[in-house]
Amino acid sequence: MRFYNTLTRKKEEFKPIKQDKVTIYVCGPTVYNYIHVGNARPLVVFDVLRRYLEYKNFTVDYLVNFTDIDDKLINKANEDGTTVKEIAEKFIEEYLNDARGLMLKEESTNHPKATEHITDIVNFIQELVEKGYAYSANGDVYFDIAKLDDYGKLSKKNIEDLVSGARVEVNELKRNPMDFTLWKSAKPGEPSWDSPWGMGRPGWHIECSVMARRYLGDTIDIHAGGEDLQFPHHENEIAQSESLTGKPFANYWLHNAMINVENQKMSKSLMNFFTVREISKEFDLEVLRFFILSAHYRKPVNFSREFVEQAKNGLDRLYNGKKNLEYLINNTEEKTLIDKDNEIKEEIIELKKKFIDSMEDDINTADAISSLFEIVKVGNSKLNQDSPKELAVFAYDILMELSGILGILNKEDELLDEEIAELIDKRAEARKNKDFKLADQIRDNLKEKGIILEDTKDGVKWKRVR
């Protein structure tokens, strides 16, 4: 398996620290609002990475943090006349609702919160001060980037260029305008905690270093997130973590490209974002997951409802292929495979290999999805009611095995209730009696109930409009 490592700017063979275990840290949301589609991309992409590693029999320690203390939460609490804690708790719950809709594996995800690790954060900062990498000034604590020769190695930015081009607030307390905050002194009305430097709260970057070390160790296998986090967030994580431990912070840095609206990055600051919750009112969130995975994670994607509609149509094609195989399993007989059947089986095996090869090559979900469409095409065009049951079962099992890696096609159609079942039987009887007016009327009634009928050479098939 190979990943494109942002640190080295090349694809590298993946070699985990431990033979049977992988540690992954994904930067999670600041919980002051609903997540938008751009936020969802890393969550979906790296959930698939986790699923694939588990498919390869690795144990995966997977962490997505919650930033629950930040200027954005404080401002939101002031606007709403409530507390930071209440804002955080509300939007953590809303995040979890969206995560379930996106089919993220929440049951095996660790979600530590910044406010639950204040003691660890203070101790981490204190060690940096003692080692000479950080300094206190008037109740604040800053990291001294001048102490590092390789600051900027992830983003490939030059310190001199950063300083000369810095657009930062004038702060006479800093030794260098690019020094970043580890601890902020308390302001009236803000949440604060005790520390050796007085009452205050942590800066943004420090929480990820602290929680990654606490739960995953001094060096983690994979650190992931959106490409907009390379600088300054991930650069600062590297600086503070490696200064403290003297060890590499992460061996592989994976960054997804942005989701754009009219070729501009989707963001709350530009007011051009669509929340996952808004999308869920129009589309099943499995469609959004499929939309995200339909492009390689390192390529920018333009978002529009038209493109999501196209994704829905594609996902429906896969579901229809799944349903066709289920129909064949229930309507074919046990037979001995003949040469033609074995050739079809070999074709499906080759398509599975193609899927795996795509995933091995830097999580290429776009090409992996193409392999799923090819498997469905084989099922639709080469299998019928005369095919051996074994062949239909084989194709179905492969389709479900691979789609499970992507986290799709796992929703079961609801069973037809008695009313709909009777209507289908009644329509069949009307067609038999050449009462086509009644048959068409029944078809229209079923359509209103979300059931689409298809008259095929193998009999009447139905699908539920999702």
Image (tube, grey):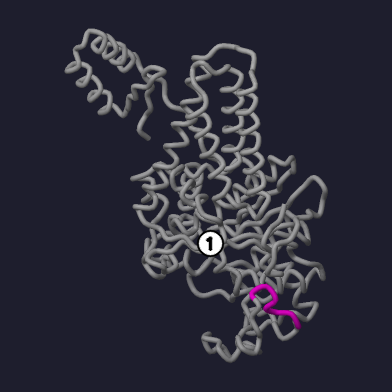
| Circle 1 SS class | loop
Judging depth in this view, the residue of 98 and 113 nearest the camera is 98
Give the farthest residue toward the front: 339
Magenta-span inclusion, residue 407:
no
In the picture, measured across the screen, residue 156 lies left or right of residue 293, that is: right
Q: Main secondary structure of the magenta part?
A: loop
Q: Quadrant of residue 251?
A: bottom right
Q: Image point 35% across, 33% down: which residue?
A: 465
Judging depth in this view, the residue of 77 and 21 nearest the camera is 21
What kind of residue is marked 1?
Answer: Lys
Give the farthest residue toward the left: 437
In the picture, measured across the screen, residue 80 lies left or right of residue 169, that is: left
In this figure, what is the number of numbered marks? 1
In the rendered image, residue 8, in percent from the top left (x then y), is placed at 71, 69
In the rendered image, residue 406, in percent from the top left (x then y), is placed at 57, 43
In the rendered image, residue 458, in percent from the top left (x then y), is placed at 41, 18
Quadrant in the picture for the C terminus: top left
For residue 408, above or below residue 93 = above
Q: Which residue is mark 1?
A: 299
Q: Quadrant of residue 197?
A: bottom right
For residue 333, above or below residue 230 = above
Task: Write down the region rendered in magenta.
Answer: 149-155
In the rendered image, residue 295, in percent from the top left (x then y), is placed at 51, 54
Q: Image point 74% across, 43% down: which residue?
A: 59
In the picture, measured across the screen, residue 211 lies left or right of residue 80, that is: right
For residue 439, above or below residue 154 = above
Judging depth in this view, the residue of 134 and 19 nearest the camera is 19
Within-10-Å neighbours for mark 1: few <14, some 14–19, many 20+: few
Q: Image point 39% across, 64% down: which residue?
A: 261
